[in-house]
Image: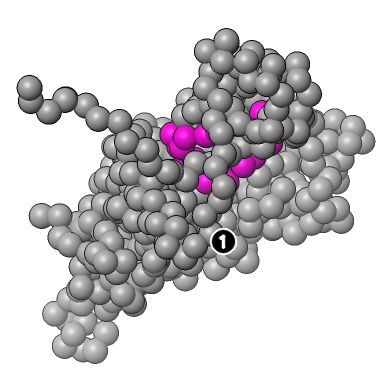
Amino acid sequence: MARVIVVTSGKGGVGKTTSSAAIGLGLALKGNKVVLIDFDIGLRNLDLIMGCERRVVYDFVNVINGEATLNQALIKDKRVSSLSILPASQTRDKDALNKENVGKVLEELGKSYDFIVCDSPAGIEAGAMMALYYADEAIVTTNPEVSSVRDSDRILGMLASRSRRAELGLEPIKEHLLLTRYSPKRVEEGEMLSVEDVEDILSIPLLGVIPESQAVLKASNAGEPVILDTMSDAGKAYQDVVDRLLGETIDFRFLIAEKKGIFSRMFGG
Amino acid sequence: MADASIEFKGSSFTLSVLHLKTLVLADIRNDLEKKVAQAPDFFYLVPIVVNIEKIASSVDYQAIKSLIEEFNFTFVGFTGAVSKEQRKIIRELGFSFVNTTKVDTSQKAIVAEEALVKEAEKTVATALSKLYTDKVHRGQIRSGQQVYAKGQNLVVIGSVSAGAEVIADGNIHVYGSLRGRAIAGAKGHHKAQIYCQKLEAELVSINGNYWLSESMEQHWSSPVYIHLNDNELTSSKLI
């Protein structure tokens, strides 16, 4: 059985798509069969981040409407053969999806993949509900600031009440907290909520902390998920996230601001 | 011989009279449900006399009594301008028939009545505060969620997030942080209290008296209980 993981947040711009791309690719690099689904119908971005925007012929909505088969719509990643992307439609809106047909698509994908990673749109409307409905696990992407934390809390409430698992009274969705754009320096200066603050408010297990990094923007523009940038802090942090999802226990890093070394202090580095 | 151990004396009381306009039990039940739902505390165990003046003579008295008692009223008897035969039937069935006396409209009587009603309400309220059962919610109550313990106390084993709302007709206990809104004694209950391990609420309210965060500075982030003292909200440290 495939693990269906939704990457969600409530608030927009916190790094859902970046995280979906990095985690999906990371899982595939570890030898898993992974499919990434873009649920953000009308604002498709995942294909850009994955660098396959020029290869989109059919999309998720075509599959839902029976205008194309899954195999026609799935785009095989050029870097890792075990990774596929199901792109969103750019010309339709979020009402184009319906629960029944999405369920059928996920069921069919579940037969041949180990992981189904659903990149959720922002908000708490139909599109976001559709992305989380069939999830077994949720990666709640949160920035260390109050409005993002509040929206994540709202989404956690939805996960517990509006998902298929909740409706059928099954074991609840497994929740993971992914803190993105974290800047230990700004936390020390009191400008940003700390990991502990966010954990205290949301009280769900921490999956990872991604430090604020120039590498993320660079990676997005290049269409190369940041996890491939193995030299960057963000890339390393996402690698840790992937390992933790696969059951390994790894210490959290990038939580403390780097102290300037004596040489850089002397020479103003 | 010593004084008798008992003594009979006449007193007048204000009783609620339920006027029936139909014989259809389902309709009566429907309307009673609506009425009682508006103020369950007020009607609880209230003595009721049923006026059958407006309905036909073939009344199922036992069924009416059972229906009244189903709603937790205390059934007293029947009343109304009915025929002698009907009164006889009522008595033979073992129910009392209550005669109405002329209404005393003097100011004194009204004041006395008001005092009586107040006394009765107080008795009902004290009885109720003992009767509330607990609704237990396990887990955090998230932003946008609302939990209402209707006619009960609410116990939350977990925190109440900012943007969430907990409401109870009785007391509220939060075994965690209270960051959202808490409304205790929602249907009017001045003895309701709010307990929490960490007070960081957006709003707390008891019996309609409320505080916003700014009024909670004294015990902010502390374990406290909040109660009414002479209709004024007061917070006290738990530990």
User: For the magenta stretch, what is the residue range?
Assistant: B29-50
Q: Nearer the viewer, residue B199 or A96?
A: B199
Q: Residues within 10 Å of mark 1 (few under 14, many from 20)?
A: many
Report the coloring of the rendering: one colour
Q: Name the quadrant containing residue B112.
A: bottom left
Residue B1 higher or lower than A244, as above or below:
above
Q: Residue B113's x, y, as percent? A: 44, 54
In this view, the residue farthest toward the top is: B92
Amino acid type of the residue tagged 1 in the rendering: Lys
The answer to whether A193 appears left or right of B16 in the picture is left
Magenta includes B39?
yes
Which chain's residue wears label 1? A
Quarter of the image with the N terminus of chain B in it: top left
Q: Residue A185's x, y, as percent? A: 29, 74
Q: Residue A78's x, y, as percent? A: 67, 44
What residue would you read off at disc 1? A11
The answer to whether A67 appears left or right of B130 in the picture is right
The answer to whether B199 appears left or right of B75 in the picture is left
Q: Name the quadrant containing residue A135.
A: top right
Residue B170 higher or lower than A258, as above or below:
above
| Residue at x 19% of width, y 57% of height | B223
Magenta includes B44?
yes
| Dominant secondary structure (helix, strand or loop) of the stretch shown in magenta | helix
